[in-house]
Image (cartoon, helix red, strand yellow):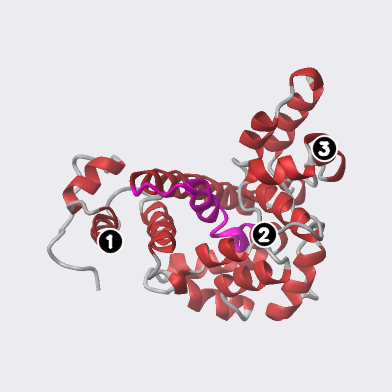
Amino acid sequence: MQPQEIKGLEGWVAFLSHAEIPVLKQTARDLATLHEDAENISARGVTDVIARDPMMTVKLLRYLQGHKHSKQEHEVVQVEQALLMLGVEAFFKRLPPKPLVEEVLRGHTGALISLLHVVHRLHRASYYALDWAVRLRDMHFEEVRIAALLHDLAELLMWCFAPDDMLKISAMQQQDKTMRSRTAQEEVLGFALVDLQLALAREWSLPKLLLTLMDDECAMQPRVRNVVLAVNLARHSAKGWDDAALPDDYRGIGELLSMKPEDVMVMIGAEAGTVCNLDKPHP
């Protein structure tokens, strides 16, 4: 059951700042397998597992920021850098992969399915963001990938700790397809998830660069624009390539990469049979 006594943005920020962030069962299994083969374990192998799980990723970054060395001059955003600074063995001792999402949401099958859909969506967004960052010759492309992976972290956390409220929000939007996410979230929770996301990032003292890259209000910056477009494309195409907002996404991506919208569709693998009116912007 979700904690009913928590109310408002400040209440949830306080609660989530002290809560153990759940991780995916597959992450725990993969890390356990690596740890069993101690002689051959590598930072790269552990990084690959952590980097697939947005919750394990932020668990690591939050811990490192909270235990930052006084002489540390640069903020660490990349998972492998964070792992090397902490040490592989220290990671396993101090950051065990628990609790498990699947245990936290036991009895909430609908919420678990929705959370896994969000994780899949964020994987796609992070893949898009990484690909475009490489095309733009961004030397720090991994930072952009992580920002896309963590862009909807607050949504994941609320699915874990407020599944009943999140199901209400989902039901409202199913009943009224025109209802904006922010409107539904504010009606049920009293705040928008994006506001919770930024508040948590500040409370946890996450790297300022990551905070900027996840902030849609900074979308005029090319790297942030990359993240926003990747997240939007993953969200709008989650149920197929016929969403009315996709033509605007293709145009925006085309402007970012200096490509025609039609070429963008080919690049991202949009279904060949999809009919999109690229001449008329979506209102």
Q: Amino acid at mark 2?
A: Leu
In the rendered image, residue 138 lying in the magenta stretch gets the answer: yes
Residue 230 place in picture, x, y as percent? 40, 54
Image quarter (top left, top right, bottom left or bottom right) of the C terminus: bottom left
Q: Contact, CB < 8 Å: mark 2 with mark 3?
A: no
- In this view of the protein, which residue sits in the foreground, 249 or 189? 249
The magenta region covers 136-157
Q: Residues within 10 Å of mark 1 (few under 14, many from 20)?
A: some
The residue positioned 17% from the left and 52% from the top of the image is: 260
Instruction: Decide which of tag 2 and tag 3 comes sooner along the chain.
Output: 3
Give the numbered dot on residue 92. 3
Residue depth check, mark 2 versus mark 3: number of the one nearer the observer: 3
Q: Which residue carries the number 2 mark?
A: 157
Q: Please name the predominant secondary structure of the magenta segment in the image.
A: helix
Q: Which residue is mark 1?
A: 252
Disc 2 or disc 1, which is closer to the eye?
Answer: 1
Q: CA distance from mark 2 to mark 3?
A: 22 Å
